Every structure is written in C-alpha cells, then in structure tokens.
Amino acid sequence: MAGGVFGGDHDDECAEVRRLVDEIGRRSFEARLGHRTRPERFDDELWDTLHDTGLTRLTSSGEADPGVAAVVLRGLARHAGAVPVAETDLLAGWLAAAAGVEAPDAAPLTVAMADATVAAGRVTGTAAGVPWLPAAAEVLVAARTGDALLVDAVDAADLQVSEGHNLAGEPRHGVGFDLPVAAFTGIEASAGEELTRRGAWARCVQTVGVLDAAAEWSAAHTRERTQFGRPLSAFQAVQQALAGMAGGIERARAATTLAVAAATDHGFGSAQADYAVTVAKVVLGRVVPAVTTAAHQLHGAIGVTIEHRLWLATTRAHSWVDEFGRPGHHARRLGRAVLSADAWDTIVDGRGW
C-alpha cells in the first residue's frame, strides 16, 4: 500500500523527506492522543518543527517541486497533522508571489476565495469554508470579478468572520469582506482556476494519506482481534473486505500519482495538470465512501468517536473529497470533455482536454 510517488522506491531526496515527515508526524500524533477537540486546535508545536526543518514553504520558496510537496502532505495527513501546510505553501504562498503581495514568511497563511462585486471603490464578497483561519497570520483574499482576480493580504480582524468546521472538526470559517479596491492587486482571472486546481490537488494527495492510515489500522485491528478462537483476519469475508479496500486505495493512488506527475512535469497551470486533477477527484469520489465504510465495518462498534484514531482518518477523507470542487462537478467536466473529443484519446492521455 505504499507504491507510486509515495513509495520507498523513489529517489534519495524523497526517501529522506519521507522518513523525516513520518517521524515528525508520528511524534505529533502520539502526543495528541486523547487530547483532540472539536473543532480541531492548531498544532503550533508541529508547525514550529516543520518550519524549522524547512517543510512549510517547499514549492512557494522554489526549494522543491510538487513531487516532494506531495510526500510531505501525504505523510502529515496520514498522521492527522493539524497544520495548514497546503494552504500556506501551495495556495497562499503561491498566490502572494503571483500577485507580488507581501505576506509573512514564517507564519501560517490561508486563502479566502469568492466571487466579488466592485462598486463605489469597494470590493465586497463572501467566502465559504476558509480553512484554518484562526491559525493564520494573514488571509490572502482572492476576489473573482469575472475579468480578473483581485488579491490582497488582510488581517483576520478586518474581515467579517463566522465560525465553522468540517466533518473532521478542522476550522472552516465563513468570511465576508468589504475592502477598498485600491488595496488589491489585479492578476489574470486564470489564476483563480489554478488556485482551485492547486487546492483540489492537495486534497487528493492528503486523502490518499488518510486512506492509507485507515487501511493500515484496519489490517492491524483484524490481526489482533479474535473471534471463535481465530483472528478476524483469518475469516474469508474479512479478507475480501481488506482486499477491496486495498484495491480501491490503489486506484486512488494511481490517479493521484498521475496528478502529481502532471503538476511536476508541466506545472499546475497546464492542461495536463487540469486533466489529471479532474480524474483524481472523480476517482477519489468513488473510492472514499467504499473504503471508509469497509474500515468502520471491520472495526465493528468502535472507531466512530473522536477518541478513536480511525475517526481522524475517515472524517478527513469525507471532508477533503468535497473541497475545491465536489467529485460530481469534476465528473461533469470530464464527461463533457469525453463527449466533445475522441473518447479514447481523452481517457488515455487527456488529448482533446
């Protein structure tokens, strides 16, 4: 269950990063056992450790490509790390650089993206589901106006905030803004599409991480628990369920590996990355319900409360798969592409996309 871009057969740089992230994530996970809350609290100790080791700004600093960032995101997700690394690096860090907007280098950041109206010298709009707002030193407001994307780095105190969280308890706040248009920097509207694609890409990678954790814990649980004098893993029905989980996760891993390769080779703004991320979101939309259901069935009557580690994985999978475009939205995009071009070429390599 550890093949592809996340596996141990990758180059030395990724192998070293993989071991480092696994060790940091494992220590954080063990330290927080029994202390999880809803909503989830930002893990400032984990953030400081990641920052000190240079893992919070890999792509926005130009120090590493998306392939390395994927290893970090998958590893942190596998250990339920409560830190906005994807939001800070792939989203806010990239957006600030693209717009030439100054933002803090060391502190966590987040992005509030929304359709906006420009009138009387003001930019107004409302963003839903802004991740990790309480932890962010600044919010990169990305206001879509139709012909441009307006960007500004804003202190949360200057926004109208309504608290909320996703199924996993991670902060997802509503944000309203009414700011002077002079404070914004305008960039091409296509940057908004890339921003959404980057978010979807990150959530696909993270979801593979939590599905891996759910599978590992399910396999361990069925080996350790006995029924009628035998381990649960000795029963054929349990073996079939575990095999089904493994097959689904490998489908998700293959699609996500394609997305990682496309972003690494061609960039997030490319048609190749757009196609691959769309495919990955569609696949994960089918895999997540089946894998998480099987995991809870194999755990029996446990694993459904915040105190159990399985809850941390399955609720994140269900939350993340719907962020930055639900699977149904991406399935419709993929379907339209197939119908408007040669179906075989589109399915095989994205030609016609």
Image (cartoon, rainbow, N blue to C red):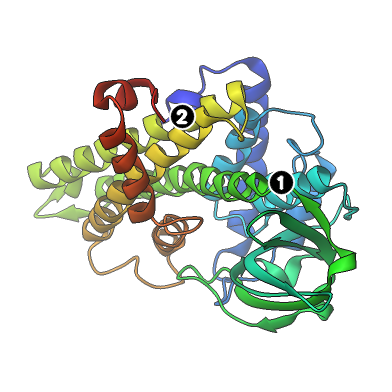
Percent across and percent down for residue 87 are 67, 53
What residue is at 9 percent from the left and 55 percent from the top? 228
Q: What's the distance in space between the residues labelled 2 and 1, CA to CA?
A: 29 Å
Residue 154 drawn above or below residue 261:
below
Q: Mark 1 Cα within 10 Å, few/some/many (few <14, many 20+)?
A: some
Residue 122, picture quadrant: bottom right
Residue 29, picture quadrant: bottom right
Percent across and percent down for residue 109 are 76, 58
Residue 174 drawn above or below residue 67:
below
Q: Are marks 2 and 1 in contact (CB under 8 Å)?
A: no
Percent across and percent down for residue 225 are 24, 54
Between residue 151 and residue 304, name the one nearer to us. Answer: 151
Disc 2 residue type? Thr
Q: Mark 2 Cα within 10 Å, few/some/many (few <14, many 20+)?
A: many
Between residue 353 and residue 87, name the one nearer to us. Answer: 353
| Label 1 sits on residue | 188
* Whether residue 137 can be seen here: no
* Image mark for residue 291: none
Residue 155, picture quadrant: bottom right
What residue is at 79 percent from the left and 31 percent from the top? 62
What residue is at 68 percent from the left and 35 percent from the top? 20
* Whether residue 43 can be seen here: yes
At mark 2, the secondary structure is helix
| Label 2 sits on residue | 257
At mark 1, the secondary structure is loop
Q: Quadrant of the C terminus?
A: top left
Q: Quadrant of the N terminus?
A: top left
Disc 1 residue type? Glu
